[in-house]
Amino acid sequence: MGIYDKVTQKDLDAGRKYLMSGSVGGGLPICIESGKGAVITDTNGKEYIDCTSQAWTYNIGFSHRKVIEAVKEQIGKITHVRTSFDTVPKLLLCKKLGEMAPKNLKKIGFCLHGSVANESAMKLAMVNRPGGMKFLAPFENYSGRTLATIGVSWPYHPISKLFQPYMENCVRVPNAYCYRCPMGLSYPKCRIACAEYVKTMLERGVEPVYALILEPMQASGGMIDFPKGYLKRLREICDEFGIPLIFDEIQTGFGRMGRMFASELYDVYPDILTFGKAIAGGYPLAGVMMRDDMELPAAASDSYTFAHFPVSFIAAVATLDVLVEEKLPQRAAKTGAYITRRLKQLQKKYEMIGDVRGPGLMIGIELVKSRKTKEPASEATHHIVNEAIHDGVIFGESKFKGIGNVLKIKPPLVLTEAQADRVLEVFEKNVKKQQDKLAKKR
Ligand SMILES: Cc1ncc(COP(=O)(O)O)c(C=O)c1O
């Protein structure tokens, strides 16, 4: 008899009592037992289409046969090997990732969490630009929750404020959040003034800068996609001032936006790229890719006990094969375009749908009380997300910037068209309900 056959509800309730929270925005009332494709099943047998891909990690879908087989083979051999030794999974993954890495981002390092990968990237920038003092990061940037990455993430969140002494490592610059432009301008008339502001800051001598770190599309900060030219202009400015550009592709990487990496989609390449989440099909793995002509750090300056976890490495080898063989980036582009088109049709019908952002299966919908005032419909967003769970669809919810009015649709890239239709149906049903409620209050 296995563990699952013996478990009782009493055991689960007792366990929950001792669990320290630490989850993003509180626990959801679901105990997950299994997953397949884009669907997860709870311990009561109820199924849900998961538009969060469990923290955007299962781009290839849950329980992919190839990953399971690869992992089974590896756990029969050895599960943990210290970073000082080579293993077959490690070298195979380096070969695959090295061949796949954009441009000359051919030096690769590993760890198990995205936050740690971003710290590695920050260290690499420090090695390559000694004498710096601060990092630049745009408003709404999210790079993780280790102490150094909290510093370059949203500053205004009460959680971040607790760690204030560690938040002195960053100077913030305006982001190209065109729906609510921080500079009060509108694109394209603005001529991307937010990027030009970075240049002004550098010219006027803000503290010596180590690097500019940002996500090519800001995910946790509100699903903010940047207008054409923003990233390119930042690249030019970094080149002009000799500042390394770090792209955090922890969410945007591995097909989610319709290309393997967002850098390729925008045709703008960083000096250091961080990856994580979806790389290993549900196993923990993250890391950095750095330009191969940059200086490497001393060996011991960035090393962690489990960083070269062979089980995750072999899972990643299988995952990358699946992404390519099943053409999942292309599929994300197609399904994403379909959902976005349908959402834009719904936008004509529902005042609440303020903005629909993408591309690919990196979809964010900003919900507002009125399109004119753009007042965030935060409570309504929360209700939509919570009620959709009963309808068997789990949406993501952006809780940050203190607004929390962005609903996310970021399912596994294997989502079928029928599942996409169901997601849209549940979305519309719940938006309608909330919109009717708002209308009654007026
Ligand atoms: C863009 C981005 N960077 C970094 C991180 C942190 O990754 P982890 O939670 O694996 O430390 C996240 C996690 O949500 C993320 O979305």
Image (spheres, rainbow, N blue to C red):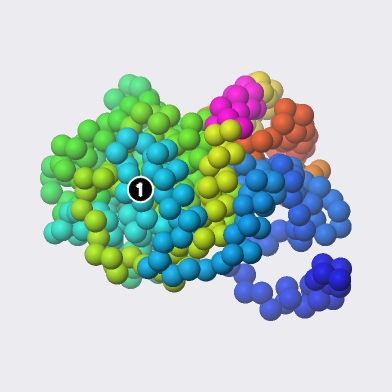
Q: Nearer the viewer, residue 435 or 193?
A: 193
Q: Position of residue 361 (x, y in %)?
A: 58, 34
Q: Position of residue 158 (x, y in %)?
A: 47, 63
Q: Position of residue 376 (x, y in %)?
A: 57, 42
Read off the residue under disc 1. Answer: 289
**Residue name at image x 48 percent, y 31 percent:** 259
* 334 magenta-colored: yes
* 437 magenta-colored: no
Left or right? Give the position of 371 relative to 261.
Answer: right
Q: Amino acid at mark 1?
A: Met
Q: Nearer the viewer, residue 416 or 67?
A: 67
Q: Quadrant of residue 302?
A: bottom left
Q: Quadrant of residue 319?
A: top right
**Residue name at image x 60 percent, y 28 percent:** 331
Left or right? Give the position of 302 relative to 337.
Answer: left
Camera sees residue 253: yes
In the rendered image, which quarter contains the C terminus?
top right
Residues packed near mark 1 inside 10 Å, few (<14), some (14 to 19) or many (20 plus): many
The span shown in magenta is 326-341
Camera sees residue 397: no
**Residue name at image x 82 percent, y 69 percent:** 2
Left or right? Give the position of 405 relative to 253.
Answer: right
Dominant SS type (magenta): helix
**44, above or below 225, in the image:** below
